[in-house]
Amino acid sequence: MRVTVRLFARLRDLAGAGELIREVPDDSDARAVWNDLVLEWPGLREYEKTMSVAVNAEYARMSARVHDGDEIAFMPPVSGG
Amino acid sequence: MTSEPLDADALMALVGAEGDGAVVTFAGLVRDHNQGRRVQFLEYEAYEPLAVRALQRIVDEAKELWPSARLATHHRVGRLEIGEASILIAAASPHRADAFAACRYTIERVKQIVPIWKHEHFDGGDVWLEGATADPEDVAAREKAYRIACA
């Protein structure tokens, strides 16, 4: 199945793109999507413990199941305001 | 969320009512220095659909804590120059204590859970600023914001 990955701020810089279309196995969770990204861009790994994840623009856990067509966002610590 | 300059009068008009005795507003500004660096300008990036939801969540939390308060908040994205406002919050209430507390709670929570990032451009380079790991379910973070609001 196919998902859209969104990356923000420094994560976007590390991967060189803010939006990626990725092919992932059925029954994947957000962690599987992330692990696949880390294989390609090892620099992302430093965010493993500090990032947040969202599925279809709702905060989620890394264990959240993802489905075909979902948008999975990985976000570094926030600094708004 | 907007890329246009923020308008405090417009925001205050959203929350005011005739029963109000107080409106507290907060403006967050771009300052010319940060951690020893001379800042040239900031670029704000947001995950907008989630940022809007997170802002709405914060307003709902504040309304639960201070039922008499009404809140509005606007956040700007894109390039901001020194002295420009990146965020405006307005909190109205019949009495000032609730308006102050709800306003303070809102900015503390924005810094905890709204997916927005500052890209700082300074003399000699640029850096992404990173604060809190965003987790709206983190009860300790929520309690910390409440304690600060009531201090």
Image (cartoon, coloured by chain):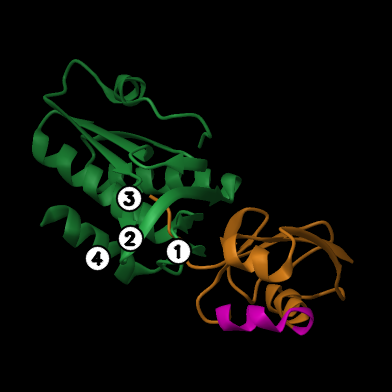
Chain colours: A orange, B green
Secondary structure predominantly adopted by residues drawn in magenta: helix
Label 1 or label 4, whichever lies nearer to me, is 1
> Disc 3 marks which amino acid?
Asp
Q: Is residue A65 visible?
A: no
Foreground of the two, B91 or A75:
A75
Q: CA distance from mark 2 to mark 1?
A: 10 Å
Please tell me whether mark 4 sits on a helix, a strand or a loop. Answer: helix
State how far apart marks 4 and 3 are (Cα): 28 Å
The amino acid marked with disc number 4 is Lys
Task: Check whether the beta carbons of the residues at disc 2 and disc 1 lie within 8 A of each other.
Answer: yes
Which of A4/A65 is in front? Answer: A4
Give me the chain letter of mark 4.
B
Q: Position of residue B117 (x, y in %)?
A: 49, 56
Label located before the other in sequence (1 or 4):
1
Dot 4 alpha-carbon crowd within 10 angstroms: few under 14, some 14 to 19, many 20 or more: few
Residues drawn in magenta: A39-47
| Element assignment for label 3 | loop
The nearer-to-camera label among 4 and 3 is: 3
Going 46% across and 49% down the picture, which residue do you hit?
Answer: B42
Disc 3 designates what residue? Answer: B32
Q: Secondary structure at mark 1?
A: loop
User: Which residue is identified by label 4?
Assistant: B144
Amino acid on which disc 2 is placed: Asn
Chain containing mark 3: B
Earlier in the chain: of badge 2 and badge 4, it is: 2
Image coordinates of residue A11 in percent, x first then y, are 63, 68
Foreground: disc 2 or disc 1: 2
Seen in the picture, residue B19 relative to B112 is either above or below; the reply is above
- For the view shown, which residue lies furthest in the top direction? B18
In percent of width and height, residue B129 lies at 45, 63
